[in-house]
Amino acid sequence: MLKIRKFLQYRKCIRCGKEFLAFQVQEFNRKKECICTNCRDVQDYTTRNFETRGKKTEMSFSFEFETSRRCSELYELYKYGFIACYDGSISGSEWKSAIFNNRKSFHYVCRQIDKFKKYVGSNCGTHLHVGTQYKDKMRQFENELFKPILQVMRDNPETTKKFWGRYFGHYCSQYIDNCRYNSFNTRSSVDTLEFRLLKFKNAEQYIKACDFCIWVTRYINYHIKKDSFNTAKAIKVGEFIKERYKEVSGTNVQISVNEQTG
């Protein structure tokens, strides 16, 4: 067997780590990394990714990297803990990330996949899920929490597109409706607050927007867990989120420029 092995070329799959004969795997990048037939199969839409990355902190988050076409180059995403899933609303696959336990590990992966931004087409989003134990309570106060920031986002469409990566649409509503397509979605199937408007234009833009979303969830979690949380306090939290958004997105600057040119 050892003699035979010398005359056969074996390659290791980057996902499962098993060795296969060269003709049983597919190369997908300049490094000539390979993936086996089983590992490159697209999973069902409802498949969850339970892999975790990074040292644990108080927060956890994951995202869905939707693509507009299928390409062997994208197999490299498996290296970073993604799984490919079917999604009938897009032409490519929905790549579900691992669950990140801290922003350092999250930022690293975002920068590694920046080269794949060309596959995020016009019909794609890059939804972020941030963990929360208070999703049901958030839904109870969602108007107070999210209407103020939504109003600012509607009033400043260019800033919205620059910061979030796109403007509102059918799958990321500008209003709060009784459905899961709200831009700030409290109706996801898991214990997360989902930010549906996000779109990966480049790593710098996406990291900045996601850091804000993680802060929003942490800020709400901190206040909403208190027994004294009520409508009046939810209004204050919503107003603070709005003001913080205007600061990090540059909305205040945009408004002053418009006033000067008007």
Image: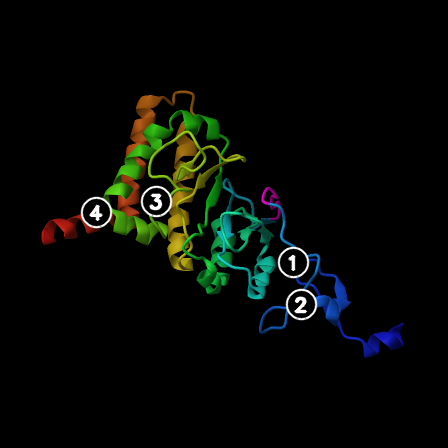
- At horizontal 88% and vertical 74% (from top left) the residue drawn is 2
Label 1 crowding class (10 Å Cα cut-off): few <14, some 14-19, many 20+? some
Q: Disc 1 or 2, which lies upstream in sequence?
A: 2
Label 1 and label 2: CA atoms lie apart by 9 Å
The x and y percentages for residue 21 are: 77, 69
What label does residue 158 carry, if any? none
Label 2 crowding class (10 Å Cα cut-off): few <14, some 14-19, many 20+? some
Where is mark 4, residue-wise? 252
Q: Nearer the viewer, mark 4 or mark 3?
A: 3
What label does residue 168 carry, if any? 3
Q: Disc 1 or 3, which lies upstream in sequence?
A: 1
Label 4 and label 1: CA atoms lie apart by 46 Å
Q: Disc 3 or 2, which lies upstream in sequence?
A: 2
- At horizontal 24% and vertical 46% (from top left) the residue drawn is 156
Q: Is residue 229 left or right of residue 55?
A: left
* Amino acid beneath label 4: Asn
Is the residue 94 above or below the residue 6 in the image?
above
At numbered mark 4, what does the secondary structure look like: helix, strand or loop? helix
- The region drawn magenta spans 45-51
* Amino acid beneath label 2: Gln
Label 3 and label 2: CA atoms lie apart by 39 Å
Instruction: Name which quarter of the figure residue 118 lies in.
Output: bottom left
Q: Disc 4 or 3, which lies upstream in sequence?
A: 3
